Image (cartoon, helix red, strand yellow):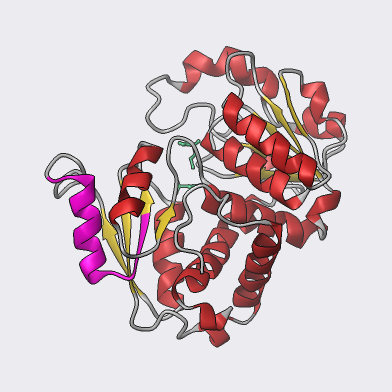
Amino acid sequence: MLQHFLTGLELDQTKILKLLKLAQNIKNQPQEYANALTGKSIVTLYEKPSLRTRLSFDIGINKLGGHAVYLDQQNGAMGNRESVKDFALNISAWADGLVARVNHHSTLNTLAEHASIPVVNSLCNLYHPCQALADFLTLQEVHGDVSQLKLAYLGEGNNVTHSLMLLAATLGTDFVAVCPKGHSPDAQIVKQAEQIAAANGASVLISDRVEAAVGANALYADTWVSMGNNACLEQVKQTFMPYQINAALLQQTGASTVLHCQPAHREYEITSEVMDGKNSKIIQQAENRMHAQNALLVSLLNPNYV
Ligand code: CP
Ligand code: NVA
């Protein structure tokens, strides 16, 4: 049984495909899963702000009959008022699961080391694996077999890029990250993704030229300035503007689908014309956060339903 979900690499291709199928079933037949988490309490802990993650976990857990408890840092920051280890030990004494959005991946490792309940990464500096599950659920809904696709990410190489790249590699999707010089994804994670992709008949390409995205079925954007980065969008605009997803780029690449994990900054990483246009699956993608996460929670906490 899966114990924690910290990087996404805990699941191989077969298990991810099974999870996506479960997510689709939960989405299509929610009444069948209305008691899947009855009697379970899940703490969702945040060191950073959130709209989608907070609401999709909270509302999603409620739809499965479970109880979500929101824990921010207002009432005693983790590692400050008490240690990360003591957070893990205490939360484990009452709750059945812990979903954590943290500044540093090492915090998740410490939580998982000391928790006696499953720990799920809901974003850290290196990964956003719940987001990638929703992204591939959406690609599957729109395009069918994702192993036949080419996916191009444009912008800053970051946590979202890493998880997208690793899941693409796992599922056999060709992946291109188009990032300005000095903003490429982490070299070690790229290497890891290349190895996984090779085993699954797929490719990983990192480039600073937008031409590398030509032929992609889907284009993907994230903010140019992630949480915790003190730069402002105006400061980085000049560097990143050539990577904006706009109508001209859609035409140049021939892509038919546009994704964005959000929060989006209209007229920066994506134009309103594209975000609100017919190629955009961004709201479907946001909805799918809930279904993908619910599938993950059911797999972790009540495998009888899987
Ligand atoms: N995509 C995403 O994780 O959004 P939030 O930061 O609003 O949770
Ligand atoms: N890369 C972004 C993702 C937000 C969902 C960040 O870390 O802020």
Vertical arrangement, residue 119 with respect to residue 153, above or below: below
Q: Taking 25 as reference, is 173 above or below it?
A: above
What residue range appears in magenta?
A: 82-99
Q: Residue at x 86, y 28 (%)?
A: 252
Q: Quadrant of residue 125?
A: top left
Q: Nearer the viewer, residue 201 or 167?
A: 201
Q: Residue at x 42, y 19 (%)?
A: 231
- Residue at the far left in the pictured view: 81
Depth order, front residue of 248/222: 222
State the residue at coordinates (15%, 39%). 80
**Vertically, is 74 above or below 134?**
above
Q: Is residue 52 left or right of residue 28?
A: left
Rendered location of residue 39, percent (x, y)? 33, 82
Is residue 39 visible to us here?
Answer: yes
Q: Quadrant of the C terminus?
A: bottom right
Instruction: Provide residue 118's location: percent of width, then percent of height.
Output: 39, 63
The quadrant holding residue 69 is bottom left
Q: Percent x, y for residue 119?
A: 39, 58
Q: Is residue 152 left or right of residue 298?
A: right
Q: What kind of secondary structure does the magenta stretch mostly adopt?
A: helix
Residue 156 visible to the viewer: no
